[in-house]
């Protein structure tokens, strides 16, 4: 971490806790971060729980995010949810380009860019996920793949002036228990920051780059100690308040 950038810990609840249990989990997390300062904590429940969790978080330090949005503001798109709807529900953040959407729903770089733009258009702060598959890593293509995914959203990153966040999530590390080593994470994060520096050094210094992929209480401190790791996007461990809070505490500046 770097003292210039405020650490950010975001929890991606995926398709869990979409009902009444969401408020209970949110309340436990909110209570646990009351004494944490100088850190941003975001939770991203399913769409169905957003409005209720927004009410639960009223006046608390935890911020609300969604897991996806449609690139259009409204229209005949059965089953979809738009950026303005997320804002109405109280969300301030949204995850875009998660690998589960890229790989299970065929979302490509153009769609990820359109969603990022749609988020910024309504004042939602996007958490833009990038990352390579195991085959791409073993094939020595990691940096090229991530660079290419990032290329598509560079205009939006520039426009956001540090409001948008990048999350490096190696696909092989998500939900597997095999996190990237600190050296692997730092190498990619440094490359992402160098790519941002091509636009402007101020943008590169301001933009937070999260690591995601099997972050747990026992590996969080080491990953967060990397100079270009500014926080974490947490999946499985964000469903357990004790684990998620332990990760948040590991991000708390000394
Ligand atoms: C994720 O889904 O973004 C993620 C990082 O999951 P996990 O922490 O479970 O690997």
Image (cartoon, rainbow, N blue to C red):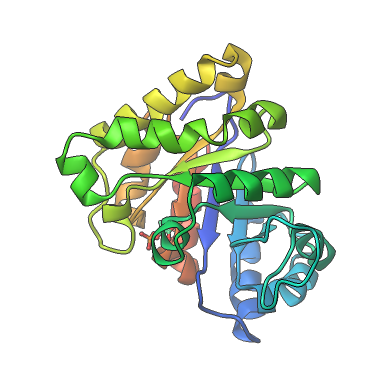
Q: Position of residue 170 (x, y in %)?
A: 32, 47
Outermost residue toward the bottom in this view: 20
Residue 120 located left or right of residue 5: right
**Who's the residue at 25% across and 61% down the image?**
177
How many numbered callouts? 0
Outermost residue toward the left in this view: 138
Residue 141 located left or right of residue 168: left
* 132 in relation to 12, above or below: above
Q: Quadrant of residue 176?
A: bottom left
* 1 in relation to 235, above or below: above
Outermost residue toward the front in this view: 76
Taking depth in this image into account, of 164 and 99 the one nearest to the observer is 99
**Who's the residue at 65% across and 34% down the image?**
156
Ligand 1 in which quarter: bottom left
Residue 242 located left or right of residue 128: left
Q: Position of residue 200 (x, y in %)?
A: 60, 14
Q: Quadrant of residue 162?
A: top right
* 96 in relation to 208, above or below: below
Q: Position of residue 83 (x, y in %)?
A: 75, 58
**Who's the residue at 22% across and 55% down the image?**
178
**Who's the residue at 26% across and 54% down the image?**
172
Q: Is residue 209 visible?
A: yes
Q: Is residue 227 visible?
A: no
Q: Position of residue 14 (x, y in %)?
A: 50, 70
């Amino acid at each position: 971490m770097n003292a210039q950038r405020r650490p950010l810990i975001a929890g991606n609840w995926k398709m869990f806790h979409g009902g009444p249990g969401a408020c209970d989990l949110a309340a436990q997390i909110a209570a646990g971060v009351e004494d944490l300062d100088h850190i941003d904590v975001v939770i991203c429940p399913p769409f169905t729980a957003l409005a209720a969790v927004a009410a639960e978080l009223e006046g608390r330090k935890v911020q609300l995010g969604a897991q996806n949005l449609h690139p259009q503001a409204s229209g005949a798109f059965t089953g979809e949810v738009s950026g303005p709807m997320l804002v109405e529900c109280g969300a301030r953040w949204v995850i875009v380009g998660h690998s589960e959407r890229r790989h299970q729903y065929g979302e490509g770089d153009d769609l990820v860019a359109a969603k990022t733009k749609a988020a910024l258009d309504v004042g939602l702060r996007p958490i833009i996920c990038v990352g390579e598959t195991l085959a791409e890593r073993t094939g020595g293509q990691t940096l090229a793949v991530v660079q290419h995914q990032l290329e598509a959203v560079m205009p939006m990153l520039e426009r956001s002036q540090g409001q948008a966040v990048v999350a490096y999530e190696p696909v092989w590390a998500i939900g597997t228990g095999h996190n990237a080593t600190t050296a692997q994470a730092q190498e990619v994060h440094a490359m992402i920051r160098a790519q941002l520096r091509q636009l402007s050094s101020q943008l590169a210094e301001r933009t937070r780059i999260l690591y995601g992929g099997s972050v747990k209480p026992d590996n969080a401190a080491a990953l967060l100690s990397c100079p270009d790791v500014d926080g974490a996007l947490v999946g499985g461990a964000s469903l357990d308040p004790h684990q998620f809070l332990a990760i948040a505490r590991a991000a708390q500046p000394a």
